[in-house]
Amino acid sequence: MRRAAFRTILLTALLVLGTGCAVRHSPAPQLPLVQDAGAYHGLPGDARLMSPDIQAAAWSDFLTRHFDPWERTRPEFPAEKVFWGLTAFSKRPLFGENILPRDPDWLSAMADASRVGEYPSLNRRAVSVVNTSMRVLPTDKPVFLDPRQAGEGFPFDYMQNSLVLAGTPLYATHESADRAWVLVESRFAYGWVRATDIAWVDDGFAKRFRAEAYAAVVRDGVSLVDEDGIFRCTGTIGTLLPLAGDTSDNGEAADKGLTVMVPARDDRGRAVAKLARIAPGGAEPAPLPPTPDNFARLAGLMIGEPYGWGGLYGDRDCSATTMDLMAAFGIFLPRNSSQQAKLGWVTPLEHGDGQAKKNLLLEEGVPFLTLVRKPGHIMIYIGSENGQPVVLHTVWGLKTRRNGVEGRAVIGRTVITTLEPGTDLKDLARPDGVLLNSVNSFNTLP
């Protein structure tokens, strides 16, 4: 115990002494492009970017994947994948709240809480009843790597895996030792969620919730209040909920608002369906027609929203922005940017100079359906301006370098840029800080 305590004090002292070498944050780059998602595609606003048959096939595939967790009878992932965080961080100095070093025994305590040797201990269907954080280990406590390093520290909490929106079907595979956390699998990720943020699903609820028609929430911050006046959850772009009542004319119903089913948790933890009315402008029948006007409308509501690593604080990172936007149109995307970049028609860009990359993207890219990838980051191609490809993306920052010290020019939100933002920055790292130089592929959906 004395050795562990001494090590903690020593790391804290070193961290404090090292503040003179703290990461340098530069001013945010200028954003010369108009922040209007519909200004660059050059297409008729009501043109369909997918044929009805192709969208119908994509929507069917989406729903199959969405509800697949309720079809499982055993975990999809083995223990070595599920508990990867226990080994991945075992030999690295970890920091927690207030940038203080974590006790070396912290991971051991997490292993005990995770009951690794007893996995899997559950085989139950569930549904999220609120927007909930999916964590790598059963804890709300953060884990940061060395905050003195560029691109580390806040907001990069490595315990945060993803945000799970209310109404997401889940398969529960395991419980923590204190039963406060449940390990779940969804259509896009797996991890630990708060036990009180989910409800257990029986056959009756599953049948009712798998409805014939669905609503897509089309703006963030939609308060879902049930027929008894009880707040249940907040809808965001990416939220899909079953339509309730007569759905024979969804278009007309949308003009008057939509009634949806929202899941709730009863006093025994079981899922019950409640009805909530969404006012006009808050939700529309899903999937939305895949037109430039519709894509631009939803994407435009995301512009300026804060960056949120792994969905931290309910905000989006780059791959959550693409996943949530595409969900409204019935297009499935996985959660990870590298996996998203493998879907559809993939065009490699590993060879060729920057101009060749831009030319190929301008020639073959489809606004709103083409994703542009660099390692660790994904962007949506939305058109062009003065011969330059234009992308929408949720980005933390750009790499800078001054007197040999690496830093970041923090953008920290969803923006519209070319593939070469930050050229106005004197300390932009060149060539590695220029996005275009590391773009290695684009892919067109679905």
Image: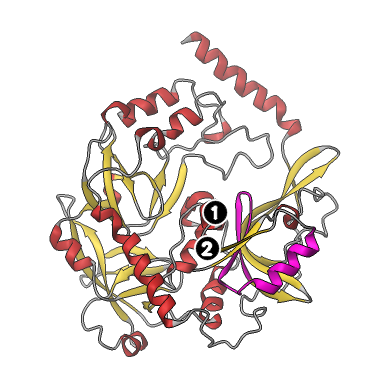
* Vertical relation: 409 (above or below) 244: above
- Quarter of the image holding residue 54? bottom left
Q: Is residue 102 magenta?
A: no
Lateral position of residue 345 relative to residue 357, left or right: left
* Vertical relation: 46 (above or below) 68: below
Mark linked to residue 337: 1
* Range drawn in magenta: 353-381
Q: How busy is the neighbourhood of tag 2: few (under 14 within 10 Å), some, or many (20 plus)?
A: many
Q: Is residue 362 magenta?
A: yes
- Quarter of the image holding residue 418? bottom right
Question: Looking at the image, which residue is at 54% across and 83% down?
Answer: 293
Amino acid tagged 2: Thr
Amino acid tagged 1: Ser
Of residues 52 and 253, which is closer to you in this image?
Answer: 52
In space, the residues marked 2 and 1 are separated at their CA atoms by: 9 Å
Which residue sits furthest top? 2
* Vertical relation: 81 (above or below) 92: below
Disc with the residue nearer the chain's start (2 vs 1)? 2
Lateral position of residue 363 relative to residue 178, left or right: right
Q: Residue 79 location in percent, x, y? A: 35, 33
Q: Which residue is mark 2?
A: 322
Q: Residue 283 location in percent, x, y? A: 38, 77
